[in-house]
Image: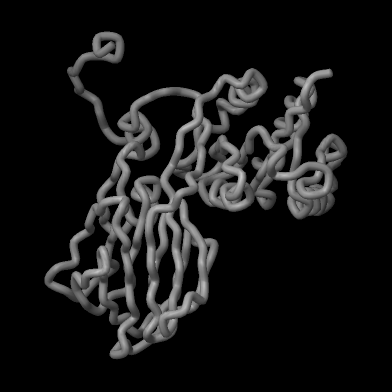
């Protein structure tokens, strides 16, 4: 008797393209004798989406429910049908089991995704054949302390951001690295990011692009009123901290990957360090990160006269 192979599907259930891709994935997986799995709330959301457009959701009859018929530890792989936000949601679901994630980009830039919509059928076939490689991505452990006591703990794949909670009020903070104060200033916030997150919020704020193979953390101030407010690349062995100062005109808020949040009163302290748990991304090709940058950002490379990949070996 062959061992059952369970593939979790996580989709952007509010988009027709993602729902259609989910149906295609289910049909291909079932035809290959793999078992598709979905979270119960996603099953309900797709059923409602299909009902609103008078379309059938019969394809969901082949799907097992996560947490009912199958546990996270049973999963072989997660196929994510959507953009980077959907991948971040999927990473949250399998955080404890480190199940590999394969993203099929149905969003915009989709930096975390491995395949685009036009390569969807091939991606499913590669999953069936187990023809993919798995890459580890650094994540962050994040905790909030108030009056010296921990009040909140979470994690981040892209970034942990301390931001002002009121648009009209500046946040006064002091930044600390390795338990030593670096600088205090007023700002809109502070981004503490991973190399994976260097092409997300930190990139938009003027931070550097860091290759995923680099073991490091980033700190990027947001609209800081300070002489020294440059983005910094910091050792993964360091402890980063941001404190909301007593003189701050307003309170702050912590956001992790734009999904997990906690209010920060005056005096709150946010500590960030490298996590022992990584996120594992399934890749279909072993290409250089340069190619991904060029492809995702549509960078102009016309006129390049360097050696081609065959000459480089």
Q: Is residue 91 left or right of residue 52?
A: left
- Identify whether 312 is placed above or below 272: above
- Identify whether 171 is placed above or below 137: below
Whether residue 53 is visible here, answered yes or no, is no
- Identify whether 263 is placed above or below 140: below
Residue that lies at the very extreme toward the left in this rendered image: 227
Q: Is residue 135 left or right of residue 57?
A: left
- Identify whether 32 is placed above or below 292: above
Tell me which residue sits at (39%, 37%) in the image: 296
Whether residue 68 is visible here, answered yes or no, is yes
Q: Nearer the viewer, residue 267 or 263?
A: 267
Q: Quadrant of the C terminus?
A: top left
**Coloring basis for residues:** one colour
Where residue 52 appears, x then y in whole percent?
81, 53
Tell me which residue sits at (38%, 76%) in the image: 269
Q: Nearer the viewer, residue 206 or 142?
A: 142
Where residue 212 appears, x then y in whole percent?
35, 39
Tell me which residue sits at (18%, 61%) in the image: 230
Q: Residue 173's quadrant in the figure?
A: bottom left
Q: Is residue 110 left or right of residue 170?
A: right
């Amino acid at each position: 008797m062959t061992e059952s192979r369970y593939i979790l599907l996580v989709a952007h259930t509010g988009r027709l393209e993602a729902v259609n891709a989910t149906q295609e994935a289910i049909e291909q997986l079932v035809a290959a004798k793999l078992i598709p799995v979905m979270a119960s709330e996603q099953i309900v959301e797709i059923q409602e989406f299909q009902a609103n457009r008078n379309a059938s959701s019969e394809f969901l009859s082949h799907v097992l429910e996560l947490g009912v018929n199958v546990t996270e530890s049973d999963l072989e792989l997660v196929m994510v049908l959507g953009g980077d936000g959907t991948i971040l949601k999927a990473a949250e679901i399998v955080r404890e089991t480190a199940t590999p994630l394969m993203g099929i980009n149905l969003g915009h830039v989709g930096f975390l995704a491995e395949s685009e919509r036009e390569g969807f059928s091939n991606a499913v076939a590669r999953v069936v054949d187990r023809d993919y490689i798995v890459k580890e991505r650094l994540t962050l452990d994040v905790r909030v302390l108030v009056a010296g006591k921990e009040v909140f703990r979470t994690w981040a794949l892209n970034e942990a951001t301390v931001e002002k909670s009121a648009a009209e009020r500046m946040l006064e903070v002091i930044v600390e690295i390795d338990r030593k104060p670096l600088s205090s200033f007023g700002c809109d916030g502070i981004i503490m990011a991973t190399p994976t997150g260097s092409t997300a919020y930190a990139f938009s704020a003027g931070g550097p692009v860091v290759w995923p193979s680099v073991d490091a953390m980033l700190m990027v101030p947001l609209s800081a009123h300070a002489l020294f407010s440059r983005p910094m690349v910091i050792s993964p062995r360091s402890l980063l901290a941001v404190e909301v100062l007593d003189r701050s005109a307003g309170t702050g808020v912590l956001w992790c990957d734009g999904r997990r949040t906690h209010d920060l009163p005056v005096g709150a302290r946010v500590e960030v360090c490298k996590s022992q748990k990584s996120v594992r991304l399934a890749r279909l090709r072993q290409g250089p990160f340069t190619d991904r940058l060029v492809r995702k950002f549509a960078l102009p490379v016309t006129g390049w006269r360097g050696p081609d990949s065959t000459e480089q070996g």
